Image (tube, grey):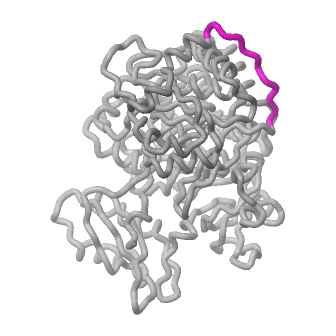
C-alpha cells in the first residue's frame, strides 16, 4: 500500500532513525537537563542528575551479582519514584527488563517468570505474598524489595514484606548503598540488543513476551517526538503519568519520550483513587497527559477536576482501547482539547498510528500511520482489501518487535510471508489514509451471518444520558448463533433495560440492537482501565 497518508505530514519526516540506544538517550538527556527535576512522587522530586547517579548504582549492584548482558530482570511495582531509577539501572547493565503487572495472581506471575527465565526481581513490598506463593517454581535467585518511601525523606508505615521473601531478599536502600561503592563497566550495546520483554495481556491464553529492542523504542520515540514537535516545549513540559509504567504506552511515551524532552514527570501511584488523583493534578500546570477512555471518563466524573488549571494543556493522547466521541466531547468542554486518539500494541513499541494534533475535531479514527511505518489491510484469504473494506490490520516498521520470546513465530503465523505483523485487529483505511479500528477480531459478534462490532454499540451508548459506561459482548443464541448483550453501569436506577434498547433502536440497524441488557455496579477492567469483555462472557 502506498503511503497516501504522508501528504498530511507537513513538517513531520517520512522516515525516522533507529540508531543509538536507550542508554544514549539517558546520557544525552542528563547532559542537557542536569539538575532540573525529572520525576515527582509523594511530594518529592529527583533531578536528571540524581536519576543518572542512582541508576548507575543499581547497574553496578546488578553486575556485582553476576548479571550479564541479555539477562532478564523482572520489575513488579506501581508508579513509585524509584521505578525510573530501577529501569535505567537494568538498561545500563545491559539487562532485559521484564515488566510485570503488580496485580497479577501467583499463576500469572509464575508463568511470566518461568517463560522469561528472569533470575532477579525488583518487587513492591505489598505484592510479595504473590511471589511467595509461586517462588519455588520459578528461576528467581535475587529479590529486591521496594517500599513506598524509597528515595524519599518522608517517613511512614510501609507494607510488610512476606516472611518467606524477607528471608531471601534485600531492600532497595541496601542495593543503592552497596552500589555506590562498587565499580561499573558499561557493556557495549547496539540498537539490535533486546531492551524489554513486554508481555501481552494473555486474552487468548497464556501471555507471550514481545521482544522489543533498543532500536524499536528509539525509532518510536523519534517518531513521537516529531509528531508532537509543534505542541511541545522541551524543558518546560509537565506530564501526568497515571497509566502504569509497566504498560508499554506509559513506558514509551510518559517515561522515555518525556524524559528525553526534559519534562517534569508527575507519577501517580494509585489512579483508582480518583479524588486523590484530582487533588494532585490541581497542584500542577499540566501540559501533557495520556490515558485510556475509562480514565478520561473517570476524571470527568470526579468532583473538582473541572476546576484544575488547563491553561498550559497542549497534548492529550488516548489509546489502549477505543476513545468514545462522547467522552472526547466532554473532555474538550472541560479542558479545551479533544482527546487525540492513537493506536498501538505491546508488539509495536507501541505506537502504530495517531491523529494529527491540529485536527479541528474528534475524527473517530486512529489517524495516520507513524513515520517509517507501512500497513496492509488483509482479507481472510490473504488478499489486500479494497479501500474502505474491513480486514486484518498488518504492520511493518522500525518499531515492530523481533517476535515473541521462545515461540516459533513463523509456524504460529505471527508475521505474513513478507514480514508484516498480524495485529488481530479489524480495521479499514480510507482514501485519505485514515485508519479506523472496527474491533478485535476475536470480539466480533456474528448475528445471523452479519458482523457486529462491539465498539460501535459501546460508542452509541456512550451518548445515552444516564449511563456511565457500557461493555458489549456476544452470547450464544439458538436462532441467530449469537445475540448482542450489553452490560451497563448507570447513574441511577431510573434507566431501564427497555430504555437502553429503545435508544439503540434509534441509532442502530435491527441486527445490532441488543437483545439482552444487564446493569452492574462496576465493569471489570485491567489495571490500565481497559474494559475486560472476556470476563463478562458466559463460561
Numbered circles on residues, count: 0
Q: Position of residue 242 (x, y in %)?
A: 44, 36
Image point (42%, 32%), residue name = 164
Question: Do we see residue 175 in this rendering?
Answer: yes
In this orientation, which residue lies closer to the viewer: 496 or 518?
518
For the C terminus, which image quadrant? bottom left
For the N terminus, which image quadrant? bottom right
Relative to residue 492, is residue 489 drawn left or right? right
Question: Do we see residue 309 in this rendering?
Answer: no
* Magenta-colored stretch includes residue 37: no
Image point (36%, 74%), residue name = 485
Relative to residue 49, is residue 339 drawn left or right? left
Magenta extent = 180-191
Q: In the figure, 103 relative to 472: above or below?
A: above
Q: Position of residue 151 (x, y in %)?
A: 47, 16
Q: Position of residue 239 (x, y in %)?
A: 50, 30
Relative to residue 400, is residue 43 drawn left or right? left
Q: Position of residue 422 (x, y in %)?
A: 69, 63
Spot the residue most to the left.
494
Image point (31%, 21%), residue name = 157
Question: Magenta span: helix, strand or loop, mainly?
Answer: loop
Q: Could you say which quadrant of the image residue 388 lies in?
A: bottom right
Spot the residue most to the top.
181
Q: In the figure, 246 relative to 420: above or below?
A: above
Image point (62%, 65%), residue name = 424
* Magenta-colored stretch includes residue 190: yes
Relative to residue 84, is residue 389 drawn left or right? right
Q: Could you say which quadrant of the image residue 186 lies in?
A: top right
Amino acid at each position: 500500500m502506498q503511503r497516501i497518508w504522508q501528504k498530511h505530514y507537513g513538517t513531520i519526516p517520512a522516515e525516522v532513525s533507529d540508531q543509538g540506544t536507550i542508554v544514549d538517550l539517558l546520557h544525552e538527556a542528563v547532559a542537557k537537563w542536569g539538575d532540573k527535576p525529572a520525576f515527582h512522587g509523594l511530594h518529592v522530586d529527583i533531578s536528571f542528575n540524581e536519576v543518572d547517579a542512582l541508576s548507575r548504582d543499581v547497574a553496578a549492584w546488578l553486575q556485582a551479582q553476576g548479571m550479564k548482558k541479555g539477562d532478564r530482570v523482572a520489575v513488579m511495582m506501581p508508579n513509585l519514584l524509584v521505578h525510573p531509577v530501577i529501569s535505567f539501572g537494568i538498561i545500563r547493565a545491559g539487562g532485559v527488563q521484564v515488566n510485570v503487572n503488580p496485580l497479577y495472581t501467583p499463576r500469572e506471575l509464575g508463568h511470566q517468570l518461568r517463560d522469561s527465565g528472569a533470575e532477579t526481581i525488583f518487587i513492591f513490598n505489598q505484592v510479595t505474598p504473590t511471589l511467595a506463593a509461586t517462588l519455588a517454581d520459578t528461576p528467581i535467585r535475587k529479590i529486591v524489595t521496594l517500599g513506598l518511601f524509597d528515595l524519599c525523606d518522608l517517613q511512614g508505615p510501609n507494607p510488610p514484606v512476606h516472611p518467606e521473601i524477607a528471608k531471601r531478599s534485600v531492600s532497595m536502600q541496601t542495593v543503592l548503598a552497596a552500589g555506590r561503592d562498587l565499580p561499573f563497566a558499561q557493556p557495549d550495546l547496539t540498537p539490535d540488543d533486546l531492551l524489554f520483554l513486554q508481555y501481552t495481556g494473555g486474552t487468548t491464553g497464556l501471555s507471550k513476551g514481545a521482544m522489543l529492542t533498543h532500536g524499536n523504542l528509539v525509532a518510536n520515540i523519534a517518531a513521537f517526538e516529531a509528531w508532537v514537535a509543534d505542541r511541545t516545549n522541551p524543558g518546560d513540559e509537565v506530564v501526568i503519568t497515571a497509566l502504569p509504567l509497566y504498560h508499554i504506552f506509559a513506558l514509551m511515551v510518559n517515561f522515555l519520550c518525556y524524559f528525553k524532552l526534559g519534562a517534569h514527570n508527575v507519577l501517580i501511584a494509585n489512579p483508582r483513587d480518583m479524588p486523590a488523583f484530582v487533588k494532585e493534578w490541581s497542584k500542577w500546570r499540566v501540559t501533557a497527559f495520556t490515558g485510556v477512555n475509562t480514565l478520561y471518563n473517570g476524571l470527568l466524573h470526579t468532583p473538582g477536576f473541572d476546576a484544575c488549571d488547563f491553561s498550559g494543556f497542549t497534548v492529550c493522547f488516548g489509546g489502549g482501547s477505543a476513545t468514545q466521541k462522547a467522552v472526547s466531547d466532554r473532555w474538550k468542554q472541560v479542558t479545551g482539547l479533544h482527546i487525540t486518539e492513537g493506536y498501538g500494541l505491546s508488539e509495536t513499541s507501541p505506537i502504530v498510528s495517531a491523529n494529527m494534533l491540529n485536527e479541528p475535531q474528534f475524527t473517530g479514527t486512529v489517524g495516520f500511520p507513524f513515520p517509517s511505518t507501512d500497513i496492509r489491510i488483509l482479507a481472510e484469504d490473504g488478499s489486500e482489501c479494497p479501500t474502505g473494506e474491513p480486514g486484518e490490520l498488518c504492520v511493518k516498521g522500525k518499531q515492530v518487535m523481533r517476535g515473541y520470546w521462545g515461540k516459533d513465530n513463523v509456524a504460529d503465523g505471527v508475521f505474513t510471508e513478507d514480514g508484516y505483523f498480524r495485529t488481530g485487529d479489524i480495521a479499514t483505511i480510507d482514501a485519505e489514509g485514515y485508519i479506523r479500528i472496527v474491533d478485535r477480531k476475536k470480539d466480533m459478534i456474528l448475528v445471523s451471518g452479519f458482523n457486529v462490532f462491539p465498539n460501535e454499540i459501546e460508542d452509541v451508548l456512550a451518548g445515552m444520558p444516564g449511563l456511565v459506561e457500557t461493555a458489549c459482548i456476544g452470547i450464544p443464541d439458538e436462532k441467530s448463533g449469537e445475540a448482542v448483550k450489553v452490560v451497563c453501569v448507570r447513574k441511577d436506577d431510573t434507566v431501564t433495560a427497555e430504555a437502553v434498547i429503545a435508544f439503540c433502536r434509534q441509532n442502530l440497524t435491527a441486527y445490532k440492537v441488543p437483545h439482552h441488557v444487564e446493569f452492574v455496579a462496576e465493569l471489570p477492567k485491567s489495571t490500565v482501565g481497559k474494559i475486560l469483555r472476556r470476563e463478562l462472557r458466559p463460561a
